[in-house]
Amino acid sequence: MIRLTTMCLSLALLAGVVCAADWPMMCHDSARSGIADTPGPSAGTVAWAAQLGGSVDGSPIVVGGRIYVGSSSGEFFCLNRADGSVVWHARTGGTITGGALLRDGRVFVGSGDGFVYAFEADSGDLLWRHRTGRPILAGLALTQDHLIVGSMDRTLRALNQETGRTAWRIDSEGGISAPPAIAGDVIYYGDEVGSVSAVAASEGSRVWTAKLSGRVIAAPTLADGKLLVPLMSLSALSPPGVQFLTAFDVADGKKLWTVPKPTAESVMGSPVVYNGIAWAFTVEGYVSSGILRGFSLADGALIAEQKRGRLVVDASLAVAGDTLYYAGQDGQICFNDAQSGGVTKTVRLGGKIFSSPAIADAKLYVGCQDGKLYCIE
């Protein structure tokens, strides 16, 4: 087992090969499942913390022996997975709030300066950059042939991974601040005015569209033929029937179920599905009342509910083994039973957390507003 792991790490360093012990993109995979391939941390202790300067709100990715993450200073870091030491760092022209992607020795990341950057994964050398019209907050994904970039300029673009040249682009109603989900040849994404679209990855033509009343600021999740779309309320007041989590049929965009509330509740991080339960953390904006809720994936019926007081969670949820993890603005990482939602352990860090955690090889990696990236075991 040790020999296999060592071989896997070496291959990943040389060619960007993704192994089972990795977390290669935000929410783990193209379906944005949030499900780790390995067990998660259990002790709840900090193994190391790397000081990176600016607030670390972006989501780390873990591939082989390295971690890639950006900060509010505009710097993009490659770290040693064992101890958090800096292997290399490069500078972009704006804050980095999203997660990176790695393939074939290239690592891609979007920046608040409106550019997407491609760096050589081993050295940090700039290979190319592509300019959009507005900031890129988190909207990156990979298909077989293209790098998919969502921008606040209201476009979704497919770029050649080697050159950064545009293969196709499609206009959206609103800015795109969340990464898309991908299944087969179809890209699924939402925008900041509540439009949800399915787009053919090969040519950028629309397959179907739907409309919700709110903002999509977190990646949708694909599970069992359904597209789960989280929604942020447009107001902190109380408009009726806010559809904070909606399930669509992936084939035709038919709305299968939704869970409206009479208050202005929001889901600001991607949901996660475990054993037929769709977990989402909802926040009532007016009083910042946070609730972890579990819904039946089949019909949206409420299964479990854990009230967490005045807690706001902006980050996406994750599951490893039978444990559900989430991070909050109170600076805590919460370990929860993935069947009941009950809290089993908490770990407090040094500042607010907006970074979505990555879980790989029984460790959790997460950024914090104290300027550090933490490794928890």
Image (tube, rainbow, N blue to C red):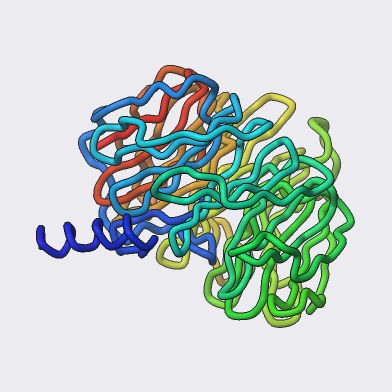
Q: Nearer the viewer, residue 361 or 196?
A: 361
Image quadrant in which you'd find residue 321: bottom left
- Residue depicted at 33% across the width and 25% down the height: 49
Q: Position of residue 370 (x, y in %)?
A: 48, 18
Residue drawn 75% across and 65% down? 166
Viewer-closest of 113 and 99: 113
Q: Nearer the viewer, residue 356 or 155?
A: 155
Foreground residue among 232 and 6: 6
Q: Residue at x 34, y 27 (%)?
A: 347
Q: Is residue 242 visible?
A: no
Q: Position of residue 173 (x, y in %)?
A: 89, 56
Quarter of the figure with the C terminus: top left
Residue 336's spot in the image, x, y percent?
36, 43
Q: Residue at x 52, y 35 (%)?
A: 90
Q: Is residue 4 left or right of residue 54?
A: left
Q: Is residue 225 above or below residue 75?
A: below
